[in-house]
Amino acid sequence: MSNTAFGTANEDNANLSKSDSKAVRRRSLALLGSLIRPVRLRFWLTIATVVLSQAARVAGPALIAFGIDHALPALRAGNSLPLVLAGVAYLIAALAAAGLTALYVTSTAALSQAMLLDLRLWVFRHTQRLSLEFHEKYTSGRIIARQTSDLEALRELLDSGVSSLASGLLFMLFTAVTVFALDWRSGLVVLAAAVPMFFLARWYQKHSQMAFRQSRVVSARLIVHFIETMTGIRAVKAFRKERENAGRYGELAEDYRRATVRSINLNGVFQPGLVLIGNVCVAAVLLFGGFRVLTGDLAVGVLLALMLSTKRFFQPVDQMAMFYNSFQSAQAALEKVSGLLEEVPTVRPPRNAVELRDARGAVEFRNVEFRYGTGPLIIPTLNLAIPAGQTVALVGQTGAGKSTLAKLIARFYDVSAGSVMLDGVDVRQLATADLRRNIVMVTQEAFLFSGSVADNIALGRPEAPREEIEAAAKAVGAHEFIMELPEGYDTDVNKRGGRVSAGQRQLISFARAFLARPAVLILDEATSSLDIPSERLVQSGLAGLLRGTDGTGPAADSPAADGTSRRTARTALIIAHRLSTVETADRVLVVHDGQVVEDGTPDELIGGNGRFARLHSAWKDSLV
Amino acid sequence: MAKQSSFFRSVSRLYPHVKPVLPRLFLGLLSALLASVVALAIPQVLRGLINDSLGPGATVEAVWGSAGLILALGVAEAVLVALRRTFVINPATTVETRMRVSLYGHLQDLPVSFHDRWGSGQLLSRAMTDLNFIRRWMAFGAIMLVVTTLTVVIGVIVMFTMSWQLALIFLAAAGPVMVYGFRFRTRFSKVARRSQDQAGDLATTVEESVHGIRVLKAFGRSREALETFNGQAEELRQTEIAKARHQAVFSMVVTLLPELALGAGLVTGIMLAASGQLSIGSLVAFFATAAVIAAPVEFSGMLLAMALTAKTALDRHFEVMDSQNTITGPADPRRPADVKGALSFNNVTFAFDDAPDKPVLEDVRLDICPGETMALVGITGSGKSALLQLVPRLYDVTAGSIELDGVDLREFSVEELRTLVAVAFEDTTLFSSSVRDNVLLGVVSEDTDTREKILAEALDTAQAHFAYSLPEGLDTLIGEEGLSLSGGQRQRLALARAIAAAPAVLVLDDPLSALDVNTEELVENRLREVLAGTTTLIVAHRPSTVALADRVALLEDGHIAAVGTHAELLAGNGHYRHVIASLETEPRDLDSELSALDDAEEVSR
């Protein structure tokens, strides 16, 4: 962690210091290596196919030469066997070349797709694992940029580069051998061309690395802006932000264009540069050989062969330049991807998890302290015990720390000191599956995924049959409006539930929680967008759920699904600013500055003269 | 053949974009052609030079001359290669960028109903991957396709001059290759299209998995999300492999048939030569030419695949560009001489495009006087939010009309209308910029002092004083890329934004839902002053919000069931009591609460 470019920090900077640059480069290459490792057999097989297909292709001209040099005279002499041989051999070579070409095209695709799939899943899994703290900073646009345009760069490398590199190198090797065999002095001249090529490649590497990094940074910015506009399109339109956005996007697109042109132009120097060096070398060999022909050291025929071989030697240089170009591009992309993968989730599953299948639901805060990162202390030492089955309302002003307490129980964040316990087990000791089965949190923002309404409810318990999904919807009073939708439970909620109102979204997300039947249910302002009748339905449904007798809601006339009666009561932590919600609680906690300042039953607190009593009278006033 | 014209039709749609840069693209093509001619010439020249000038008795000058010539040709080749890039890169990237910007502009223009249907990942893949590909095809694929085709055509003509019999044999292979090429084209296009669409869907899934990360974490459903993603990624992989398989078969055909023809040509040629019908020189020259065009012929498989992919990418691009924006202003927009803010709904019916038989609003009639605050009350799903969105024309009415000061909303210019109407939605989208910029988004005034004053007032009214104590005060970056705020904080900023715009009509969708009681009361007290002179339509779920309003409209199943003051409706309307009556009056134990609910439902029927 010593360098400043660890993880995604400093990600937007294309001009890295030397040591940072080295570090991210190494990280990127390591990622590439670990992607190749599982498919290395296929990798070598693909290369072998490429080489063989090249060999089959080279056989063609050789057979033609054989035909003209040997079969023709033989035929004239009345012997048609060599001609038949040549014909058959040519046929075989053609078949082999064609077959191997087809094989290596599919094999390359299989290889590259296997690696891409691997990396896609890896990135996806990792981003899911990363804590909310990370996501709140990083933005979805960036993750999408990593998953789309960065992976696209890798794909280009894999699809085009590897095979051309292998065949090119081999071709050069063979031709070099030919040149040396013909005349080793000329061979040395050809080898000498490697020196300027090396320096050109060095120059290119240095500059293109920066250019490609820049291009990655700018393209990510472009994507972030694009995604933000498209997901917030209603607000964009309502406030006529279109023109401003178009200006900004135009700038970013132009930046991206410039970065692209810059990298292409570098390649535009590099590739012709290599061609030039090759051609100069051909001229040098000619000059060198020509003089020796004059002195009689070299036969003219040898010189001709030498020249043609030298010229051929530099043919694959074009392809190599292309490969190096996509390699640099992919490496810059993998620098970013590997940075994302390097991020460590701050909330990690335990190594040796304590098993807790069905918790009773007793929650305890023991000497809990909390701060975001190194920020100020938000929750100073807190001790609190919530027995199983209790319904607790958290009350307090916006920013008092109610949500933070809830997030600590749900382990969206980890405590800075002390511990949060479920049934006496530290939540950090629970396997993710156990934790999430036992504790479920419903937040104010009810996100819907594309798919049907039923799919969205089923998120609470994917294995639940349709009857239970409908029972859950009935229990929270969502059944009616769902049946009103064009295709009932199978209606596609479209993009972000565009056509389902906020209240309906909250009902669906409530049904989710209902279906999940956790031991501890946390509701963070989960009813704020509901109208009073809906809230009433939700509350009666909730009361049933919390008592452990599901399906007592007025709309839920179907019998509760079995397997639910095992549990008696559930623990609930409700954050709400509605009196109606608070009054149904067994216990009210008034939170102020991260501390519990009042604790008691609603009646006790109303009777007192603390904050809650004042709040209560304010509530009363607000109810005309 | 209809399919073929569709390829050219798709590509020809690029023409208007490409037209201004056509000369440069042509120069690029010319450079590429010349470069390949030079590359092909060098070996011939070498042969000539060595055989003629460097033969016995050659001079030192001849050596220098030859080397100089080769060097000149070599430099020419490199320069031409560089020139091709120089000519093409700027135009191609400019076209790409222009198309990208116009796509973005068009997407911003398209109505919300379009965005309801299209995932942003799908749109993103069009804006990035597809356009990148089109650029690469313009700068490389298309040019190389022309160069390759020309090389092959010229090569075949040269072959004919050497031996028409052999050339005919070679040409015979072209027939099946072309026939197969057509079949390949339809199949490959289909798969290429599928893979592009699947890649777009995959991006959408990524986007949702990140935006919905809280839900996924809260329910511990990362594994299921991963499975879905895995399924999609696996499908994409299969498609890509199917694509490669088509390409492989085509490359095989394209390699095999010419090679077989050459094999047959070899046998025939030798027999012809043996019988004296063909000179050995011609035979050698024929195969030398065949060797030259072998590489371009094989290359054609890849180039064709690239052209077809570019074609489907273009189709995808124009699919979005062809979507019509249905919400536009008229050519000569009207506006009332004096905007007072009288809003009237005349027999408004509204249904979503894809569910025309299930109207959300039906025959809504409602008049709101200038300066009046009208609360909109109704149970979840009664159509309140839909009604609100009609006012700034985020959606258009299906039938009937909405008028502002007697002018149909559709007769305003859209921009003008949205200046007159400001909204605060429940899902409070804040943009990635400073608090200041977010709140002042709808403010027309350019004057700094005025803006600052408006900002301070709006923040004060919305009780968003917390903004001053953010790390960098009002310049703190918020939104997705900035500091994350709580729901209540976001809601207050969104409210401040709507107020700051000082609109003629204010549309608020339950703007106080996330606020605690104290704050809500403070906001309401201040809001009352602001609303006094502004026509306001406010969705209310609670009596406290209703208290802000002069009158209340009760929405029931998409109809306006009643309009009146809170007290009137409370006294005379059972459904209204059911919707708005506080729980406070309800008994607290559950059984009696149930029976009370049943009663309420009876009343509502």
Image (cartoon, coloured by chain):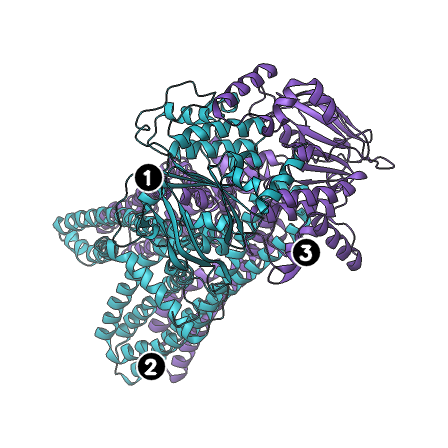
Chain colours: A cyan, B purple
Circle 1 residue: A360
Where does residue B175 sit, x and y in percent of width and height?
36, 38
In the image, residue A382 lies at what x, y percent?
Answer: 44, 55
Name the quadrant of the C terminus of chain A.
top right
A417 with respect to A528 (left or right):
left
Report the chain holding disc 3.
Answer: B
Please name the amino acid that badge 3 sits on: Arg
**Which element type, helix, strand or loop, lies under badge 1?**
loop
What amino acid is at disc 2?
Answer: Phe
Say which of marks 1 and 2 sits in front: 1
Disc 3 residue crowd, few under 14, some 14–19, many 20+, Cα 10 Å: many
The quarter of the image holding the N terminus of chain A is bottom left
Residue at left 63%, top 20%? B575
Foreground label between 1 and 3 = 1
Name the secondary structure under disc 2. Answer: helix
Q: From the image, tell me which residue sits under label 2.
A: A288
Image disc number at residue B436: 3
Same-subunit check for callouts 2 and 3: no
